[in-house]
Image: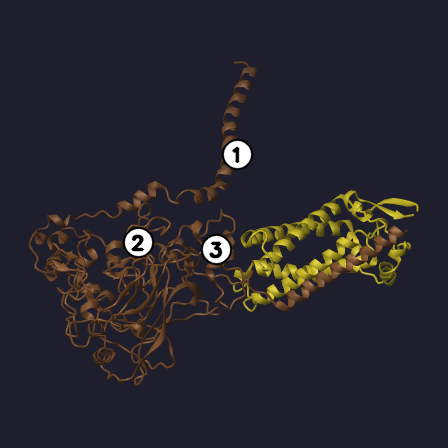
Chain colours: A brown, B yellow
Amino acid sequence: MNTRMKKIRNAVFIFGWLIPQLVSATTAAPAAGNEGAAATAAPAVSPEVIEEVKKINGSTADHAKFDELDQHFNDGTEVTEACLSCHTEAAKQVHNTKHWTWEFVNPKTKQQLGKKNVINNFCTSVQSNQTFCSACHVGYGWSDDSFDFTSETNVDCLVCHDTTGTYKKIPGLSGHPNYEKMEWPPHSGKFRDGVDLKNVAQNVGKTSRKTCGSCHFYGGGGNAVKHGDLDSSLDEPLRYLDVHMDAKGLDFSCGKCHLSDSHEVSGSRYTPTASDTEGKLIRGAQGDRNPTTCVACHGNSPHPLAAESSAKLNSHTDKVACQTCHIPAFARGSLATKMTWDWSTAGKLDEDGHRLQIKGSDGRDLYDSKKGDFTYERWVIPEYTWFNGEVHFTLFGDKVDGDKVKINDFQGSADDPNSLIWPVKVFRGKQPYDIGNETLAVFHTAGDDDSAFWTHYDWDKALTWGMNAMGMEYSGEMKFVETEMSWPITHMVAPKEDALTCAQCHAVNGRLAAITDIYMPGRDNTPLVDKIGWTLALLTLVGVLVHGGIRYLMHKRG
Amino acid sequence: MATERIYIFKRFERFWHWSQALLIITLMLTGFEVHGSYTLFGFEDAVAIHTTAAWTLVGLWVFAIFWTFTTGEWKQYIPTMEKVDAMMKYYLTGIFTHAPHPFRQTTLRKHNPLQRLAYLFVLVIINPLIWFTGWAYLFYNDWEKWGFGWLSLEWVAYFHVIAAFMMLIFFIAHVYLATAGHTATSHIKAMINGWEEVED
């Protein structure tokens, strides 16, 4: 080969290498730049990731093959006995949880909390009403104070581990499902078949949105009533309703965030983690950080730097909870949530002395003789408050005066480095107050006896019974006080394209109008500076126009 | 009246002037929107544009400061009270009657004494106020870390807005006085092509 041929060959090689390099360099840059735009147009998660997330739910045991479960069960406790023959420590673990004890002592404030102790402004109190309320207790047989909290067979495994959707605990049966066919709801003419315990037991599995939801979606006496961000529309939600639980997408179960260990479920409403500055929670990390936070997965700088404004958004995370922007409204599913409950009007009966039930156009109760007046709302804009995770409750026996009572009080302020601005549902109501004892009153609501309010519509009787159950004598004098209870909004996380925009807060009368202890650009100013500034600018403008006008006239005159 | 043309503004100076003009107008438009005075671009975009324009202006100033010192042009900003009264008198009366301009521009003295004072005011009062408060604004999240935890956003915003109003007032007066040359457009032309018409 002569030198000339060599040169040509070398040149061809070099070009052959160089051209693809150039092409990839020029095409790679725009692709990276487009990432942000592409992500907003299509679902953020690739199908492969979605498949992977789904696979994790596979189990290594088919409970239908277990002899222990291949038998007729007379009631739930017999199923539990069978469960415990293999899962020997399970009941002991459950015994240690709030789901079982309904008790919780706030380690900081030392307040005795838990469903057993708190008063709310929905059905107000569990006490004296266990037969009904225990439909949401992970146990069987809690009807009064004689319930044996040490019994292992009293633990209800199925309410959390059912996968058939046929297991339903009925209020009034002290935590049991109906084993025989019964009319439900009462006097509805509809009947529920008795539960097939064998079938349920043979099909147990992991908890799911449906099992957790069977109680947590129905808190406060009905679907969507209590939380505002939890209702049965999350059984199979679409992406718009919750990006993580999206049934056709990531399909998170509750347990995906509420990680459990030894039946202890993480994430607490009594001691919430309002702010976590520690970044992503790496598996195996030591310490007692709460895994049920946005930060635990997304970290403290969650907005991708490719997107415009991300730096500013990331810097908001020191003052603003993720939920504030990413849950623009609650009750965004198909159901309205209860916003007010006025017990003071309860007890009105029709001319025949029968219970009145007035429903709105959406089928929701507006008035019920048993409960009073309600309002419901959908697509509710939350209220916003500083919150550092500390909640002070007004408990039974706490002396309160005035006509307004905060049932729980979220602590926090702009000056507190542990506080973030949180969205909350504020539930407002009117409920009985014992004037003589100066406390929120407990009354007996439901029961087949001579005092239950829902049977006799007699406040004195219901209060006498209820206060007595709390170990206090009813003073005989009552009134209705206005109460407020706050619920942190943290579910129903919207897709990022539906998150709040800057100007929804950074504006006069914006979303954060109630947060007055910070200076917010776009909302706040010093009126005097603005007044003087604009006046001087205007005077200058007028001055130069007059000056110029005179110059022009003089010039024309020559 | 006989006129003479002299080369006053060099190429970089003119580039500096007009790019700075564009940036300052942008900053004022977006800044007062972020302040909540009106809606134009939308808050989010206004913030983004304001921030980008601010950093661009900082970059421009790095060059301008370098240029000013390496060329010795900084001397143009040394204040003087000489003929200030004559300038005042000219703007108040003489300008209307075609009295001769009390100041004669040369390449070594581009700015009349009032200009010198005005630019010096911009340089030592308005700019430091607006820049330092602006940086504080931008680095709000790092105050604690850098030992500025005692700062309050309200006061930072307060001084930033005061400086912005001063800049706005300067801007109005400056644009008007650009018409107050030998002819209504001679100053403006000089800033475009560099050549100023002056009275012979």
Q: Secondary structure at mark 3?
A: helix
Q: Earlier in the sequence, mark 1 or mark 2?
A: 1
Question: With respect to residue A71, does A102 lie above or below?
Answer: below
Q: A429 above or below B195?
A: below
- Same chain for the residues under marks 1 and 2 in the image: yes
Q: Position of residue A219 (x, y in %)?
A: 27, 63
| Residue A25 rendering spot, x and y as whole percentages | 51, 34
Label pair 3/1, CB-CB below 8 angstroms? no
Disc 2 chain ID? A
Residue carrying label 3: A314
* Residue found farthest to the top: A1
Q: Which residue is mark 1?
A: A26
Do tag 3 and tag 2 residues touch (Cβ < 8 Å)?
no
For the point 51% across and 53% down, the residue is: A311
The one of A210 and B136 positioned closer to us in this rendering: A210
The answer to which of marks 3 and 1 sits earlier in the sequence is 1
Query: Nearer the viewer's eye, disc 3 or disc 2?
Result: 2
Nearer to me, A149 or A426: A426
Choose mark 3 or mark 1, whichever is in front.
3
Q: How many marks?
A: 3
Q: Amino acid at mark 2?
A: Ser
Q: Earlier in the sequence, mark 3 or mark 2?
A: 2
Q: Is A504 positioned to the left or the right of B81 in the image?
A: left
Residue under label 2, please give it: A233
Tell me the distance, in whole angstroms, between the alpha carbons under discs 3 and 2. Answer: 31 Å
Q: Amino acid at mark 1?
A: Thr
Secondary structure, mark 1, is helix
